[in-house]
Every structure is written in C-alpha cells, then in structure tokens.
Image (cartoon, rainbow, N blue to C red):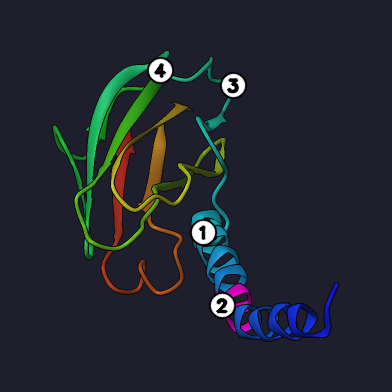
Amino acid sequence: MGAAVRRLLMTRTRHLRPVLVVLVAAAIAVGAAACGGGSSGGSSQAGGSGGAGGGTPVDVTLKDFSIAVAGGSTLAPGTYTFHVTNQGPSAHNLTINGPGVANAATPTFPSGTKDLTVTLKSGSYELFCSVPGHKQAGMDTHITVG
C-alpha cells in the first residue's frame, strides 16, 4: 500500500474517531434511560400473579408530571393488568409498592403502552414513576384495595 493511501486512511480514521465516540456515548445514554431507576423489564409480575395480561384491566395514563388511574382509586382484591400509556414527552414508568408488592414496574418507556400484571391484597398501594425526580414532581398517587 502506498504512503499516500496510508496517509489518507489515517486522516479519515482520525476524523471518524470523534463521531464514533459521540455515537457510543449516545447509545450508552439511551440504554441507561431505558433502564430507568429501579424498573424491571417487560411484563413484570408480583404477588404471585400469572403471566402478562392475565388480570382485570385497569387503564393508567402517565403525563409530565401526573398519573391518572381510570375508574378511581379503589379496587377489590385480585389480579390486575395495568395498561400504562405514556402521553408525556418524557420517558416514564409505573412502579407499584404495597402489601405483597415491592417495586413491581413497567420498563421506562418514552411513549406508547406497556402492561404490568400484579396481584393486589387488601391495603394501600403507592403508584409512582421511579425515574429520578419524577415522583417528587407529582408522579405519585395511591389506591386502596379492599
């Protein structure tokens, strides 16, 4: 290979390095955002629930920065599939804590709908977004089961 060709390849490679660094950093940032603080992937289960989609449906809407549970804040004990729709411009998740349920969560997602199936016993449950700062900004609500 001639010296001119080697010089040309080295020059092109040198110019591509910053682009590759930016692309790798962006990929890492997107991956970290998708993980979200403490959320689990896919169709989460808690409290001995069956597979995804096996419970009574409950629609939940996430926005910047609120959570709305269709049908009110009182449910009977049982297995529920929360159909969680993100209508905000930011990525969110739904995390549930309460009797027999610890940090059951949808993945953090930018838009669309994700399902979360959990079995709820009598008691009080907190529903919130675990993305850092979102709960404190108002993405926190409670439901009563029983």
107 or 135, nearer to the observer: 107
Task: Name the quarter where the N terminus is drawn.
Answer: bottom right
Q: Which badge, 1 or 4, is on the more N-terminal residue?
A: 1
Q: Residue at x 57, y 44 (%)?
A: 40
Dot 3 alpha-carbon crowd within 10 angstroms: few under 14, some 14 to 19, many 20 or more: few
| Circle 3: element type | loop
- Between the residue at mark 3 and the residue at mark 1, the CA separation in whole angstroms equals 24 Å
- Image coordinates of residue 68 in percent, x first then y, are 18, 47
**For residue 87, side relative to residue 90 (left or right):** left
In which quadrant of the rendered view does residue 74 lie?
Answer: top left
Which residue was labeled with disc 2? 19
Q: Please state which of the two labelled residues, at mark 3 or mark 1, is closer to the viewer.
A: 1
Q: Which badge, 3 or 1, is on the more N-terminal residue?
A: 1
| Circle 1: element type | loop
**For residue 3, side relative to residue 25 (left or right):** right
In which quadrant of the rendered view does residue 73 lie?
Answer: top left
Q: Amino acid at mark 3?
A: Gly
Q: Is residue 146 visible?
A: no
- Between the residue at mark 4 and the residue at mark 3, the CA separation in whole angstroms equals 14 Å
Which residue was labeled with disc 1? 36
Q: Amino acid at mark 4?
A: Gly
User: Against 97, is 16 above or below?
Assistant: below
- Between the residue at mark 1 and the residue at mark 4, the CA separation in whole angstroms equals 22 Å
Indicate whether residue 21 is drawn in magenta.
yes
Q: Please state which of the two labelled residues, at mark 2 or mark 4, is closer to the viewer.
A: 2
Q: Residue at x 29, y 73 (%)?
A: 137
- Image coordinates of residue 14 in percent, x first then y, are 68, 85
Residue 48 is labelled as 3
| Residue at the extreme right of the image, as rendered | 1
